[in-house]
Amino acid sequence: MTEHSVFFSRKKVWKLIFHFILIVVLVLPNFPMFLGSEVYINFGILYIFVLLLIFRRSSLSREEVAIMIFYSLLQLLLVLSWVNEVSLGSASISDIPSLLRPVFLFILVLGFVLLYSLVNVHPVVILDCFVKASFSILVFYYVLETFGMVEFIKHHLWVRPRLSQHNYFTSFFVTTYFAAYFYTICFGYSVVRLLYRPSFSWFAISIGFLYFVVIAESKSFYVFSFIFAFLCIYIAFNKVFKIFALTIAFSLAVVAAYSFHHILELIVSTDLRSFRSIYTLLSNPEESITLQTRYSQIVIAVSGSFERGGLGVGLGRSISLESYIASFVYRYGLIGFSMYTLYFLSISCWAYRSYSASKNYDDKTIFLFVSIWFALLPLGLMSSPMYEMGKNSIFSAFIVSSFIWAKKYYVEKPRCLSNA
């Protein structure tokens, strides 16, 4: 066997390992908690850490250094918040996984970039396979669930905190928010992929994941998905189509305003609980328990941060903090919350600049997806800070690493204008 063939066989092995890790993370059950954290997160971190020790040879890229600085500052802010809990006598050893979350997230990003370097392919190769495989698995699971064939397994492996959530399609996730977060990642990527590589399969996958978003019943991701699709189409097409799209959007807004009460009646007539919740938000927002609860949580977090000069109050493990605003302000302070929001917007702008400069459709797919995703992320996190929690923290790191590797791949292997 030649050296060339050995190299390619190794790439295939690492490619299989890469896909295996992502699929395992998707379908992994919710194991018992360890030190207040889910065990699979610790296993994932340990695995990537070992990879870093054994295989990492190259120095950090500019993008990795920037992200390292960001997570280092977040870690410092979180330590200061934890010190406040220590002074109040409410800290414990079980705080460690939550305390080191920024470090864990950074290691995840480095680990995925390392895997990309071992595979040495464009990110769309990995994302295409993963999104298609995820769709096949979720469709199979959905069929089984529709015929009541997975109730026992679902109840014991993917336990819901509330019995009513059995009415939603949360698949391998604990809550509707976490499920919708993952579905929207796949939906967003599928839409962008459909624009640049039109095919019936990507059209079917896009519609399928949009359906999963709807039956997951997360209100914030309804809006997220709609805006994401609109921005994809608006950005990707020429000026004439942009004018047409804006005209259609404006016309729909006028019709919606004129037919507001009819739309409310249509919403309340559906069987979807999220739609009835939307009806309450639109018609009587003061009666929305969810809205009032999250508002009060934000007030508590902001007030606590003001009292500490903009720093965080604590780790937030002992109180309910549902939205990312309340959670990030309480954990990282107003300073950290501002940093996190700036981080999302910076990656979005960074990706958009790369999108504008790129000529290859694969590059455009990654850069446009990442740009719109991070621009809209604060909207999606209004329900819960899924970005840095549970399985979704791994998928979040995967998206960031895909962007970093696309930048590396684009610089190291410049390609001519060939979109065939």
Image (tube, grey):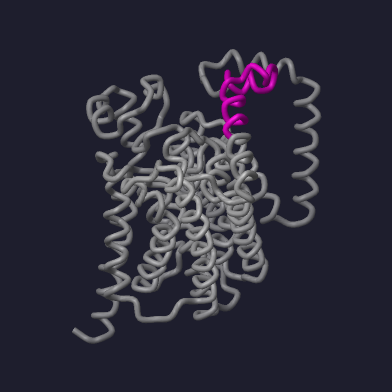
Q: Residue at x 27, y 27 (%)?
A: 155
The answer to if 3 sits in the magenta stretch is no
Q: Which residues are magenta?
A: 276-297
In this view of the protein, which residue sits in the foreground, 312 or 172? 312
| Residue 131, horizontal then vertical, whole percent | 41, 50
The answer to if 278 sits in the magenta stretch is yes
Residue 1 placement, left or right of 182: left
Whether 249 is drawn above or below 277: the answer is below
| Residue 262, horizontal then vertical, whole percent | 72, 15
Residue 46 placement, left or right of 370: left
Q: Residue at x 61, y 63 (%)?
A: 351
- Res. 68 in view: yes
Quadrant of the rendered image containing residue 300? top right
- Res. 229 in view: no
Quadrant of the image containing the C terminus: bottom right
In this view of the protein, which residue sits in the foreground, 381 or 240? 381
Q: Residue at x 25, y 86 (%)?
A: 3
Whether 169 is drawn above or below 18: the answer is above
| Residue 64, horizontal then vertical, whole percent | 49, 71
Total numbered labels placed on residues in the image: 0
Quadrant of the rendered image containing residue 329? top right
Whether 204 is drawn above or below 115: the answer is above
Question: Which residue is farthest left?
Answer: 1
Q: Residue at x 42, y 48 (%)?
A: 86
Quadrant of the image containing the N terminus: bottom left
| Residue 251, horizontal then vertical, whole percent | 80, 34
Whether 26 is drawn above or below 153: the answer is below
Prevailing secondary structure class for the magenta stretch in the rendered image: helix
Residue 397 placement, left or right of 308: left
Quadrant of the rendered image containing residue 239? bottom right
